[in-house]
Image (cartoon, grey):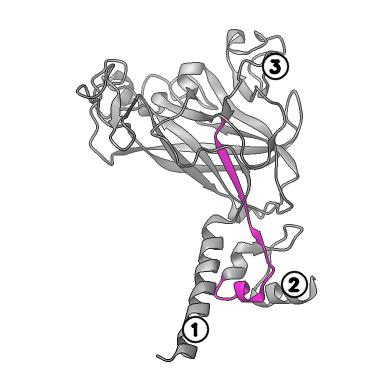
Amino acid sequence: MNTKKMSMTLVVLAAFFLVAANAVSGQVIYDSTVNPQPGNLPSVGAEAYAFKELGDNITFAGSVRRAKSVSVTMSSWACQGGSWVAHNCVTTPGSTFSIPITLNIYAAGSPTPGALIATRTQTFNIPYRPSSDNTNCTGGKWYQASSGICYNGLANNITFDLTSLNLVLPNSVVYGVTYNTTSYGPSPIGTSAPCFSTAAGCPYDSLNIALAPVVTVGTKTFYDTLYWNNAYASNYCDNGLDGTGTFRLDSPTSACWTGLVPAAQFNAYTIATNKDTCKDGGWQSLSRSNGTAFKNQGDCVQYVNTGK
C-alpha cells in the first residue's frame, strides 16, 4: 500500500472509531462517579436504611441536553452462600443476581421535586461480592490484590439506556433511584420469597447505592445533603421535621451528608459539528445544539452545513 492510500485508510479508520466512541459514551454533562473505581465506596441500602428512593438535585454542565444514558454506582454486599454479617461469605467468581431498578427524573424543585419528566426501569445483573478472605483480611471482608485493601461490599456500575425516550433535559433536575427489597421500595417483596429463609438471605437486601466524595462535572444544587424517601423520622437529618414517606430534600442546614454524594453520571448525545461523523449510522449518536434528534444521515449533514 502506498503512503497516500495508507493515509486515506487511517483517516477513514479514525472517523469510524470517533463515531463508535460517540455511540458508546456520548458527552458527560454530570459526573459524581469515582474513576478509577475502587473496590468499594461508602453506601446506603434500601433495606438497611429503610428508604424507597434516593437521589439528588443536580445542574448539568455545557449545553448538550438530549439524554443518552445514566450510570449509577451500586455497592453489592450480597453473597451466594454465607453472609458478610457472619464473616463467611462464599461466592463463585463471576456470579450475579438479577434485579429490576428504576431511574426517575423530575423537574428541579425543593424541598420536593417538580413533576416527573421521565422514568426508566431495567433489569440488571448485579455481581455478588467476592468470598471472604480470612488470610489477608479480618471481619469476613474480601481482598483486592491490586490495591491491597479489604472491603465488605463490591462497587459496580449499572447503566440506564435513555435513547428510546428522546428526552431533552432541562438545565437542572432531581433524579431518584428505586428498587424493591424485602421490606422497602415501591412494592416490597415480603418474606415469602424463597431466598429469605436461606443463610445468605435475599441478595437485593444487601444491595446499596454508592456515595462518592465530590462532583467533577456539573454541580450539586444543595451541598452536604441529598434527596430521599425514608420511612423513619430518625433517619432524616432534620429528624423528620419536613415529614417522612415523601421523596424530598433532607435538611440542607444540618449538613449531615458532608462529603457523600450519590454516585451517578449523566451522558448526553454529542452535538454534530462535522458531517463525516454523520456517516455509517453516526447520526444516531448525535444531536442539534438544542438537543433534538436527526431523522437520518442527510438531516445530520444538512444541520452541519447550514445549522438548520
First in residue order: circle 2 vs circle 3: 3
Q: Which of the pair 237/95 is nearer the observer?
A: 237
In the picture shown, does residue 262 fall above or below 169? above
The residue indicated by pointer 2 is 303
Place of residue 271 in the rendered image (x, y in percent of width and height, measured from the top left): 68, 62
Foreground mark, 1 or 3?
Answer: 1
Question: Which residue shows up at 28% across the image and 16% down it?
Answer: 139
Q: Give the mark, 1 or 2, whose residue is nearer the N terminus.
A: 1
Q: Nearer the viewer, residue 253 or 244?
A: 253
Residue 267 highlighted magenta (yes or no): yes
Query: Label 1, on which residue?
Result: 7
Q: Is residue 258 left or right of residue 181?
A: right
Callout 1 touching callout 3 (CB < 8 Å): no
Magenta region, residue range: 262-281
Within 10 angstroms of label 3, few (less than 14), some, or many (20 or more) residues? Answer: many
Q: Amino acid at mark 2?
A: Tyr
Neighbours of disc 1 within 10 Å: few (<14), some (14-19), many (20+): few
Please give the name of the residue rendered at 56% of the width and 71% of the height, measured from the top-left corner.
281
Q: Furthest residue to the left?
A: 135
- Distance of label 2 from label 3 (alpha carbons): 46 Å
Label 1 to label 2: alpha-carbon separation: 28 Å
Residue 232's tag is: none
User: Residue 246's image quarter?
Assistant: top right
Query: Could you tell me which residue is drawn at 68 percent across and 67 percent down?
Result: 272
Q: Is label 1 in contact with label 2 (beta carbons under 8 Å)?
A: no
